[in-house]
Amino acid sequence: MKLCELDSPETVAAVSCSPVENVVAVSTNQGRISIYSMEEARELKSFRPHSSRVGSLSWNKTVLASGSRDKTISLLDMRCCGLMTLGSSNLDNASRWNHSTLKGHSQEVCGLRYSPDGRYLASGGNDNLLLLWDIYGNSNTPSYTFTDHKAAVKALAWSPHKRGLLASGGGTADQEIRLWNSLTGQALSNHKTESQICNMVWSKNTNELVTTHGFSFNELIVWKYPIMSPVVKLSGHTSRVLYMALSPDGRSVVTGSGDETLRFWHLFDSNPSPPRPYSVLTLENYVR
């Protein structure tokens, strides 16, 4: 199915499927974001909230966050555009979210990820900063600013097993996975890898983290949390593994690379890991 075709010089920069509706957001290098119906394969709405490339997208129910080379983060509530009618939401004032802008980065916003409960938005930039935003708060300034990474922060992932646990990964000059307690702003641990970290995702079914890498290994690594030891290293791509998505059942991931191939990896079984209590103490007990 062909969803869209752009006229040169406009190109696709990011794609993200809604978790609650059968629509997909497509952003471009010209600052445009389009919402498409996956059932009808047609454009429903088009926005231009940015003046430059939109390389990162993340959904929180009906609210789409976008990060751009123009250094800003845009929040678009699709209910205000008549595209979604989700009744239950933690957003008290929908009109406020029609189009809000967050400013905190001094260079391109290259990574975005909402927490599972939708309260926090993590953003990473080419300025080597990791920012945490309290979306339900009244402030347009970040709750926490982390300066520990020594390269761009594109890879971000929230644990589905422990509330407030965030992982971030740095680029070529950094090559480190860092774990954070977003509830307290505490840095929990850091772990050196051997190459640029391009993307990461937590397993839904096991307490493991998957990372994808660039120069010079171009591989996938599965890490066992909390000791963060490599479980397996997977090779196959011949260029940077820039993109990764987890399947709805949590068993497989698909990766996209600069070698112009998509690869599907069956990594996990369907048995979920035992639940852990959601508390700040839990994070401190399980991360050394």
Image (cartoon, rainbow, N blue to C red):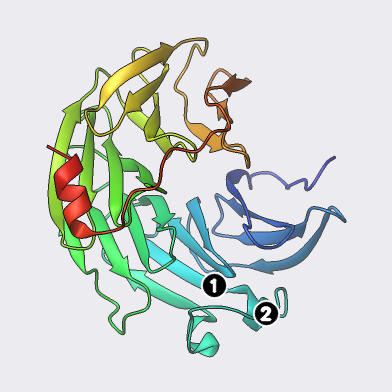
Q: Alpha-carbon neighbours of circle 1 within 10 Å: few (<14), some, or many (≥20)?
A: many
Q: Please state the horizontal and vertical placement of residue 287, each as a whole percent of the image.
A: 17, 40
Q: Which residue is mark 1?
A: 76
Closer to the camera in the image, 168 or 196 = 168
Q: Alpha-carbon neighbours of circle 2 within 10 Å: few (<14), some, or many (≥20)?
A: few
Contact, mark 2 vs mark 1 (Cβ under 8 Å): yes
The residue at the far front in this view is 274
Q: Please state the horizontal and vertical placement of residue 224, each as a whole percent of the image.
A: 32, 27
Q: Which residue is mark 2?
A: 81
Q: Earlier in the sequence, mark 2 or mark 1?
A: 1
* Residue ID at (33%, 55%): 123
Query: Which amino acid type is shown beneath numbered disc 1?
Result: Leu
Left or right of 14 in this view: 153: left
Above or below, 75 relative to 139: above
Left or right of 54 in this view: 262: right
Closer to the camera in the image, 17 or 283 = 283
| Secondary structure beneath label 2 | helix
The residue at the far right in this view is 40
Q: Please state the horizontal and vertical placement of residue 281, each as a whole percent of the image.
A: 17, 55
| Secondary structure beneath label 1 | strand
Distance Cα–Cα, label 2 vs label 1? 9 Å
